[in-house]
Image (cartoon, rainbow, N blue to C red):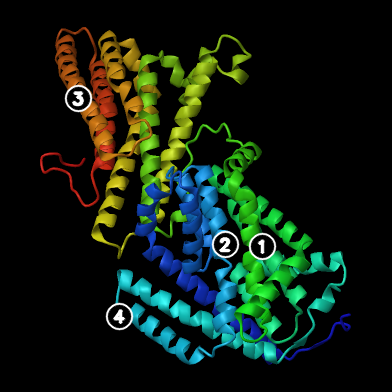
């Protein structure tokens, strides 16, 4: 039986303990952010190998989390892969399962090194060396310096936590009276709360092991806390996915279902799991080590959870997709913010988004040029009201096709503005030149897409082209020339595909220019004969030039997307 809850705590002890946790968290953050940025290119290159290879994806998730010391970072990058269209949701689940295995490495590091070996004498110089490297260098060397400093801070934090814990007389187990199932659940709840407050299951597990080493927890107490801390990571995922992209919401639900089910099994079989961990720890170590037993327990129940889910990963993915169905949103989803910390991946996501936006924009160009003028009257509200013959149409719109087209135009505007905002948040300063050049090229492409959308939104000029027989013929031919491009793109961002589609748009632009010049000669001749007024001639000439914007902006946007990183536009093809 536990003694009544006791606590003789002094303020310096609390300050030392909290400071140790803070140092641990700071070290983890520095190490995770720096290693994630350093490994961005390697992660990007690995994507092609992961697709349809679940075992490799599982191992990659585990190793990446063990190296980064953050399952959240691995999960966020995985969500970014899915959001960018680089992985399917089903393929990403293996990475998420692997991240749960990899996060158990923290317990092993703390149990085998952090609590058994006094590394502060080595860790403090690491902090100093890493900080010095950061100050005197830039780019990859600076990030490596931060990673080294973060690694040192992790062990300094553990050492400070031990010092603070030694001055605290605290019986955590008595808070929950772990003799009963409700007590075990209470301790698991406390563990989950620790993860939520610290925003790191690694820090929560490290704090638990320090308390176990100081004798304030029993083995069962610590095990129940660790299970709760494992489940608590899902709260961060849920909060991060709330109102976010479809991929983020599905990943959060999958993460929550997996961790909750695994935690429930671990709590139901807490005694046997702990006994197995204790037995293996006794065989592996020269003397009994409860911290090592907890590390084994943490790994064992996560392995058990993966063994339960992994054989049915495809069915699990389909179940999650049914739970979180795709919304019928008209706006194209912006790239995920989860990968902003990895510029190489962020640009890949932006490239995918820009290609999808270009495909939708060209399709809308062709459809709007073929339809009658009233399809765009949504942008002229007063004329829309005057044109209505049925009062009920004020609420319902003219027809379903018109409403859908107008909604798509609105969604396209939102998508292209989101892309521009997203690219403005990517930071490639200090990265290799090819990566920065790639960033600039995608920005150029998005700028042309924004101008293309502005042209599509010009309802007045569209109406004029349909009133003039010559312009109507030009617009119909232009629509026929642009119509094959969306299908040819076929969600591809391969340079050869983009270059071919850019060539199709360039051919359409050349044909449109010839028609425009002929229309200009005819219009000016009619003006000289007095058949049209000066204002009418100006409006028709403007409309002819406006038609040329569609293939021209499409060509430029696809050309920039197709250029490889580091390449520049030809000297005879100036930017405008």
| Most distant residue in the front direction | 283
**Which residue in the structure is indicated by mark 2?**
101
Label 1: element kind: helix
**Which residue in the structure is indicated by mark 3?**
507
Is label 3 or label 1 in front?
1
Label 3: element kind: helix
Assess disc 4: are there few (<14), some (14-19) or many (≥20) residues with their C-alpha within 10 Å of its C-alpha.
few
Q: Nearer the viewer, residue 539 or 321?
A: 321
x, y percentage for residue 443? 31, 47
Vertical order, 490 against 299 (above or below): above
Marking on residue 301: 1
Is label 1 or label 4 in front?
1
Q: Which of marks 4 and 3 is nearer the N terminus?
A: 4
**Which residue in the structure is indicated by mark 4?**
136
CA gap, disc 1 and disc 4: 45 Å
Residue 396 quadrant? top right
Residue 96 quadrant? bottom right
Label 4: element kind: helix
Assess disc 2: are there few (<14), some (14-19) or many (≥20) residues with their C-alpha within 10 Å of its C-alpha.
many
x, y percentage for residue 539? 28, 20
CA gap, disc 3 and disc 1: 62 Å
Q: Earlier in the sequence, mark 2 or mark 4?
A: 2
């Amino acid at each position: 039986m536990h003694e009544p809850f006791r606590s003789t705590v002094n303020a310096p002890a609390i300050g030392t303990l909290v400071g140790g946790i803070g140092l641990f968290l700071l070290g983890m953050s520095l190490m995770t952010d720096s290693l994630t940025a350093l490994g961005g290119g390697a992660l990007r290159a690995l994507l092609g190998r992961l697709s349809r290879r679940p075992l490799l994806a599982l191992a990659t998730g585990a190793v990446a989390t063990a190296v980064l010391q953050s399952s959240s970072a691995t999960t966020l990058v995985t969500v970014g892969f899915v959001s960018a269209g680089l992985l399917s949701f089903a393929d990403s689940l293996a990475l998420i399962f692997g991240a749960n295995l990899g996060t158990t490495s923290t317990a092993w590091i703390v149990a085998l090194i952090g609590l058994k070996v006094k590394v502060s004498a080595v860790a403090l110089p690491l902090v100093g060396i890493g900080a010095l490297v950061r100050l005197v260098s830039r780019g990859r060397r600076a990030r490596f310096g931060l990673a080294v400093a973060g690694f040192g801070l992790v062990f300094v934090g553990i050492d400070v936590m031990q010092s603070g814990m030694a001055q605290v007389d605290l019986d955590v187990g008595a808070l929950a009276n772990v003799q009963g199932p409700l007590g075990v659940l209470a301790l698991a709840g406390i563990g989950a709360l620790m993860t939520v407050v610290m925003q790191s299951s690694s820090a929560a597990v490290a704090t638990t092991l320090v308390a176990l080493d100081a004798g304030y927890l029993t083995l069962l107490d610590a095990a129940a806390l660790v299970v709760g801390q494992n489940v608590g990571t899902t709260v961060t995922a849920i909060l991060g996915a709330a109102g976010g992209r479809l991929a983020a919401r599905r990943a959060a639900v999958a993460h929550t279902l997996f961790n909750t089910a695994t935690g429930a099994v671990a709590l139901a079989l807490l005694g046997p799991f702990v006994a197995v961990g204790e037995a293996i720890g006794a065989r592996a170590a020269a003397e009994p080590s409860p911290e090592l037993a907890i590390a084994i327990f943490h790994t064992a129940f996560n392995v058990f959870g993966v063994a339960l889910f992994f054989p049915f990963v495809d069915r699990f993915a389909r179940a999650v997709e049914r739970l979180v169905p795709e919304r019928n949103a008209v706006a194209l989803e912006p790239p995920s913010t989860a990968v902003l910390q990895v510029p190489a991946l962020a640009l890949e996501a932006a490239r995918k988004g820009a290609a999808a936006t270009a495909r939708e924009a060209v399709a809308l160009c062709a459809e709007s040029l073929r339809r009658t003028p009233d399809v765009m009257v949504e942008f002229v509200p007063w004329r829309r009201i005057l044109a209505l013959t049925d009062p009920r149409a004020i609420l319902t719109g003219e027809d379903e096709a018109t409403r859908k087209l107008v909604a798509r135009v609105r969604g396209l505007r939102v998508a292209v503005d989101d892309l521009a905002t997203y690219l403005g948040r990517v930071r490639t300063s200090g990265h290799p030149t090819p990566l920065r050049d790639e960033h600039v090229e995608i920005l150029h492409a998005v700028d042309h897409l924004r101008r293309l959308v502005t042209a599509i939104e010009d309802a007045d000029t569209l109406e004029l082209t349909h009133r003039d027989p010559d312009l109507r013929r030009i617009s119909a031919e232009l629509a026929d020339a642009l119509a094959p491009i969306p299908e040819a793109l076929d969600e591809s961002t391969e340079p050869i595909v983009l270059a071919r589609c850019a060539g199709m748009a360039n051919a359409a632009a050349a044909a449109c220019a010839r028609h425009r010049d002929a229309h200009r000669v005819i219009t000016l001749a009619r003006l000289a004969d007095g058949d049209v007024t000066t204002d009418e001639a100006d409006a028709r000439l403007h409309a002819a030039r406006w038609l040329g914007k569609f293939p021209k902006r499409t060509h430029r946007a696809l050309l920039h997307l197709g250029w490889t990183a580091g390449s520049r536009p030809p000297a005879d093809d100036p930017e405008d």
